[in-house]
Image (tube, helix red, strand yellow):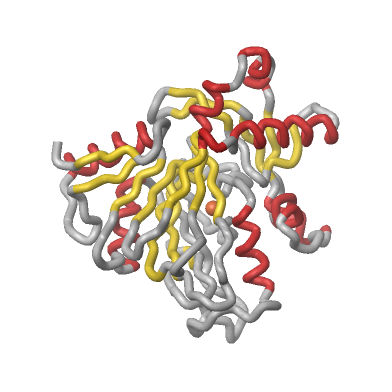
Amino acid sequence: MTIGIEPLHPLYAARLTGVDIRQPIDESTMTEVRAALATYAVCVIGHDQPPTNEEHIAFSARLGPLERGESPKIKGTEVRLPYPEIVDQSNLNDVGEIYADDDRRLAYKRANRLWHTDMSFYEVRATYSLLVGHITPPSGAETEFTDMRAVWEALPQARKAGLEDLIVEHSYWYSRVQGGGPEPTEEERVTRPPARHGLVHLHAPSGRKALYLASHASDIVGMPREEARALISDLMDFAVQPQFVYAHKWRQGDVLIWDNLATMHRATPFDDRNFVRDMRRTTCREKAMETADSLIA
Ligand SMILES: [Fe+2]
């Protein structure tokens, strides 16, 4: 055993010590990291200095095939972080300034404050997300989690009845509108069709069943919409009760890894007009994609 594991919550989440993603990591240590992730679902590795983008990408690639976004295509547009594997989760524009209040991208980022799993609106789901804290604001901006395996196990038997057969539709547009964004045009809507996933699935790394839900969950196949949304909302409320929630207080240099197939998460508010929060994310997927999906939330 070369890594240390310090649990952060009674049900899941742990700090891993004795591992530094800025250094070469041998395969037996990676096996321990993967085993810790299978058990704890949310793991944090602290560093004195944030890893570079290259170190972040190289470590992430050892946990699975990486999501690659498209390069910007509109002439004259730039991105702050020109790495197809890295999603810029900061409140900074392409020249490193805090977004203007009316910037649509800021409104979009605030939609991350709804409970969700990353990219559930894709057929090929996200497995691990790895978020690196480069600059953290003095207060607020915790990332909150819930463990959907523990949630499933805690659901009363009577409420579990029939749930395992249900198929849920996850739509990018649904959560965007829920988060305060405009209704998409029909033209926009067809570019991002919904994806379907079982409401309950077996989380292979731990061998435990888990609910799979997100703010993107819009419908249940074969169920009237009103009934479906009431059921989704009821299960979401059950899942985010305080006893299931771990809130991560960020330190600069933290690498926070979570398993999207076992958890939900949300961002919490901070003074995003006055303080910089520079967070960068990579995402692993269930299988390698030949083309970039490019739209990540
Ligand atoms: Fe997210």
Camera-side residue of 97 and 193: 97
Residue drawn at x 23%, y 38% as measured from the top left = 32
Residue 1 sits in which quadrant?
Answer: top left
Q: Position of residue 247 (x, y in %)?
A: 47, 48
Q: Position of residue 193 (x, y in %)?
A: 71, 49
Residue drawn at x 55%, y 74% as measured from the top left = 72
Q: Is residue 242 left or right of residue 159?
A: left
Q: Is residue 110 left or right of residue 136?
A: right
Camera-side residue of 243 and 209: 243
Residue 57 sits in which quadrant?
Answer: bottom left
Q: Position of residue 143 (x, y in %)?
A: 49, 53
Q: Position of residue 172 (x, y in %)?
A: 68, 52
Residue 42 sits in which quadrant?
Answer: top left
* 19 is higher (above) or lower (below) than 103: above
Q: Is residue 86 left or right of residue 44?
A: right
Camera-side residue of 240 and 196: 240
Camera-side residue of 77 and 220: 220
Residue drawn at x 69%, y 34% as measured from the top left = 168
Residue drawn at x 70%, y 78% as measured from the top left = 102
Q: Is residue 129 left or right of residue 44?
A: right
* 126 is higher (above) or lower (below) than 107: above
